[in-house]
Amino acid sequence: MNNIMIINGQKATVSYDPEIEMFRGEFLGLTGGADFYAADVAGLKAEGEVSLRVYLDMCQEKGIEPYRSYSGKFNVRIASALHAVAAMSAAAQGKSLNEWVADAIEDHAGHMA
């Protein structure tokens, strides 16, 4: 399971790569890739700060928006039986399917906000 580390206000997933015996961090929500590696948590944070600074400087130099924008719309493909259960659950709670899904996402991923 990946963990979240916040570096200079930016969230990054952190995992361990057993092949190279190092921790790997990768920033979330950027328009490009900015990853970083270190043998320990303190080193990972330091490398993350450098990686983020280099990425943001490069974006500024090239006139690129560094942060991904989200429209608020996405398609989800699920089994028809699960779709039916979700629709019935939403109706039973007096919600639209969209509201029900948004609430479920907030309940499960809200800690990332």
Image (spheres, grey):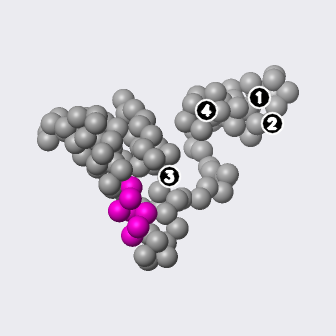
Q: Is residue 98 above or below residue 84?
A: below
Q: Is residue 17 visible?
A: no
Q: Is residue 22 visible?
A: yes
Please tell me whether the stretch drawn in magenta is mainly helix, strand or loop.
helix
Q: Is residue 47 above or below residue 61?
A: above
**Whole-percent x and y of residue 113?**
59, 38
Per the image, the residue denoted by label 1 is 90
Would you say 21 lies left or right of 94 here?
A: left
Picture disc at residue 29: 3
Picture disc at residue 96: 2
Could you tell me which residue is drawn at 77 percent across and 28 percent down? 90
For the residue carrying disc 1, how many other residues have a C-alpha within 10 Å: few (<14), some (14-19), or many (20+)? some
Would you say 93 lies left or right of 37 here?
A: right
First in residue order: circle 3 vs circle 1: 3
First in residue order: circle 4 vs circle 2: 2
Determine the residue located farthest toward the right in the rendered image. Answer: 94
Could you tell me which residue is drawn at 50 percent across and 52 percent down? 29
Per the image, the residue denoted by label 4 is 110
Would you say 100 lies left or right of 61 here?
A: right
Disc 2 and disc 1 in contact, CB within 8 angstroms:
yes
First in residue order: circle 4 vs circle 1: 1
Hey, which quadrant is residue 4 in on the image? top left
Q: Nearer the viewer, residue 91 or 74?
A: 74
Q: Is residue 1 above or below residue 8?
A: above
